[in-house]
Amino acid sequence: MSLTFIHPDEIMFAILPFGPDAAAVAEAEGLIAANRGGLLRFKGRMIVLIYVEKAKLTIERARHAMGGVIS
């Protein structure tokens, strides 16, 4: 049996690679902003509620991976 210990200050660095990257977060934020602005299309595709919900989840995953740093 082996044990691995992670210092609490290192947890963010351990989970960071598993969260969405900056480009995915920027895309999600843009889609949400376009939806709030009343647009019907974002980057050539129709804005559908499922895409908006997925964008919100992407931002939430990034916030969780960064320890709540993303505003």
Image: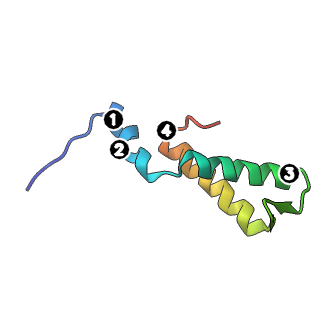
Mark nearer the N terminus (1 vs 4):
1
The residue identified by callout 1 is 10
Instruction: Residue 39: give x, y in percent of width and height.
Output: 90, 57
Identify the secondary structure beneath mark 1: helix
Instruction: Residue 11: give x, y in percent of width and height.
Output: 36, 39
Query: Image check: 13 left or right of 1?
Result: right
- The reply to whether the C-beta atoms of the residues labelled 2 and 4 are less than 8 Å apart is no
- Location of the C terminus by quadrant is top right
The residue identified by callout 2 is 14
The residue identified by callout 3 is 36
Query: Image check: 63 left or right of 28?
Result: left
Label 3 Cα neighbours within 10 Å, binned few <14 / some 14-19 / many ≥20: few
How many numbered dots are placed on residues in this image? Answer: 4
Furthest residue in direction right, as rendered: 38
**Amino acid carrying mark 3 in the image:** Arg
Cα–Cα span, label 1 and label 4: 11 Å
The residue identified by callout 4 is 67
**Amino acid carrying mark 4 in the image:** Gly
